Image (cartoon, grey):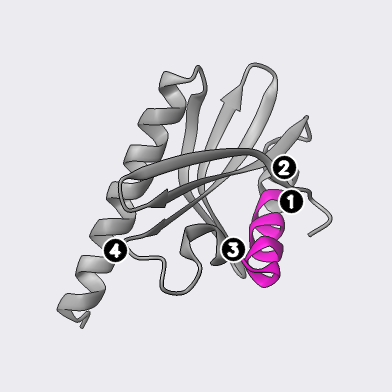
Amino acid sequence: MQTKTNDTTVARGREAETLAATYLEGCGLRLVARNFRVRGGEIDLIMRDRTTLVFVEVRQRSRSNFGGAGASITAAKRRRIVLAARHWLAWRGDCACRFDCVLIDGERLEWLRDAFTGDA
């Protein structure tokens, strides 16, 4: 059974992903999939920017006590995202892609295009 804290965290995560997807759609990207999971990795949003597939990590922090949203994307987290992206590309077909991040710190939203490479 999940605790109330976990339920709240999951709900906040969904809200952040919805906010990020809406923002990116407003910038011309098209949503392809949400919460793609494989053993060992997950991608929050998969979007298309013209001919480029965009794997998006969404990170939200209400406080910056531990460095803010951007600081929470560690090398291990990047490796898990890249692993999931490789599975997606093997399953759906190889194409041009990039890794973006949407960082939400309090009320501030920042979109980082090409935030890291697949070599992570």
Q: Secondary structure at mark 2?
A: helix
Q: CA distance from mark 4 to mark 2?
A: 27 Å
Tell whether position 81 is magenta: yes
Question: Would you say the residues marked 4 and 3 are in contact, meaning their CB atoms lie under 8 Å apart?
Answer: no
Q: How many marks?
A: 4
Q: Residue 96, percent across and down?
A: 78, 30
Which residue is drawn at the image coordinates 20% and 67% (left, top)? 8
Q: Amino acid at mark 1?
A: Arg
Q: Which mark is residue 86?
A: 1
Q: Is residue 32 above or below residue 83?
A: above
Q: Residue 102, percent across and down?
A: 50, 44
Locate the N terminus and report the quarter of the image it occupies: bottom left
Disc 3 crowd, CA 10 A, few/some/many (<14, 14-19, 20+): some
Corner quadrant of residue 6 = bottom left
Q: CA distance from mark 2 to mark 1?
A: 5 Å
Q: Which residue is mark 3?
A: 73
Is most of the magenta stretch helix, strand or loop? helix
Q: Which mark is residue 89?
A: 2
Q: Amino acid at mark 2?
A: Leu
Q: Which residue is mark 4?
A: 10
Q: Nearer the viewer, mark 4 or mark 2?
A: 4
Task: Pick the residue in front: 102 or 119.
Answer: 102
Q: Which mark is residue 102?
A: none
Q: Which residues are magenta?
A: 73-86
Q: Is residue 48 above or below residue 99?
A: above
Q: Amino acid at mark 3?
A: Ile
Q: Amino acid at mark 4?
A: Val
Which residue is drawn at the image coordinates 61% and 22% (left, top)? 49
Task: Pick the residue in front: 41 or 10.
Answer: 10
